[in-house]
Structure formats: C-alpha cells, structure tokens
Image: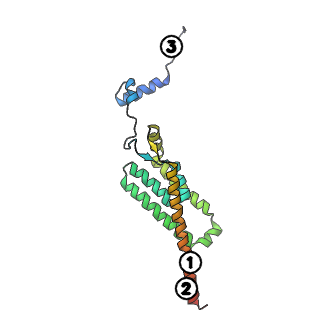
Amino acid sequence: MPHFGARPARHSVCAVRALEALAAGRSTRALGVMDTSVPGLSNSASLYSPVQTFIATLLGGPAAGGWTLSANFRATSRRRSSVIALVGGVIFSFLLAVVALKFSSRLARHADPRIVHLGYSTVVLAIAHGYFGTLARSHVASSGAKKSWWRVAGIALLGLALIRSTRALDDRYASHARILALDLCGD
C-alpha cells in the first residue's frame, strides 16, 4: 500500500530489543538464546514471594515469617542475613508470647490481637518486598521457580503449633502459680 509523506514508524519492540542486544554485546538475533537468569540466583533455586511470606507470617506468627525470609536469603547466598531473619523471627515470637502472657488481661481490654498480628505481618511484608519483591518477579519471569503454596501452608501450621504450645505451657504454669499463691496466702 503506497503512503505519502513520512515512513510508518517501526514498532517500539525493535528499539527495545536493539538496546538489550547492545547491552548484552550481541545482535538482536542472538537474543533468543541469551541467558536471562537473575544474577546471583540459579534458575533451579526457588523463592518465596512477598505475599507468600505475608500469609505465612499472618497465619503462623513471626517465626514462620522469619523462616520464609531466611530461606530466601539462603537462596540468594546471604548466609548472615538468613541466620538473622530466622533467629529474629524466633526471638520476636518468644517476646510476643511473653508480653501476651504477662499482660493478657490488660491487652484484651485495650488492643485487638488481630491488629497486632496484622501489624507485624505487614512489617514482614515490607521487609520481604524490599529485599525480594523485584528479585522474585524477575526470577519467575526468567523461568525460575516460586516456592509452593503447600509449603507456605506447612510453615504456617508449624508456626501455629509453636504459638499453641506456648499457650499450653502458660496454662500449665499459670495453674501452678495459682496453687503456689494460694499456699503462700494460707487459703
């Protein structure tokens, strides 16, 4: 079909592919076989997405969130950060349990526990998104694997079991403390 005036514009895809080729030091034909993996992460490695980390934390507590963050740090070869995330999640879970046990009657009157859970889960989501948001999307886009939702459910259940066991210990020791207090008071 004949046209008058300026030539029709080329598709912008050509320009983008040419820039990618220039950056890779190849021609645009070689882009089809170019390695698109994420630097520092093999395609066989799998990551938890920030949403998976959030769900694990919301359902399983801070220890579950620490576990998923730790796994992502291990996959990206950041061993020290991996240990910090795991230990931090366990310590925060312990501190949360102690505060909840110590101040449970006062907290029940002034704070909704769901808001506390949502608060620390949102903090973990922000951490996961900051460290792994772009990396996880790039990894999945370059044929990398994302961790299974079944694994997230399992981690959440383990975290929930940890939370329930601390409550069971509290019930057991609280009854002993009441008996001890009654014995000391002479009733």
Q: Amino acid at mark 2?
A: Leu
Number of residue marks: 3
First of labels 2, 1 by sequence position: 1
Asked if 166 appears above or below 47 in the picture, the reply is below
Q: CA distance from mark 3 to mark 1?
A: 84 Å
**Pointer 1 residue:** 174
Asked if 19 appears above or below 4 in the picture, the reply is below
Packing grade of label 1 (10 A; few <14, some 14-19, many >=20) is: few
Seen at 38% across and 42% down, the residue is 42
Q: Nearer the viewer, residue 20 or 87?
A: 87
Could you say whether the residue bearing mark 2 is in a helix, strand or loop? helix
Q: CA distance from mark 3 to mark 2?
A: 93 Å
Is the N terminus in the top left, top right, bottom left or bottom right quadrant? Answer: top right
Packing grade of label 3 (10 A; few <14, some 14-19, many >=20) is: few
Residue 86 screen position, x and y as percent: 43, 59
**Pointer 2 residue:** 180
Q: Can residue 55 be seen here?
A: yes
Q: Can residue 125 be seen here?
A: no
Report the side of 137 relative to 37 (left or right).
right
Q: CA distance from mark 2 to mark 1?
A: 10 Å
Q: Amino acid at mark 3?
A: Arg
**Pointer 3 residue:** 7
Q: Nearer the viewer, residue 185 or 179?
A: 179
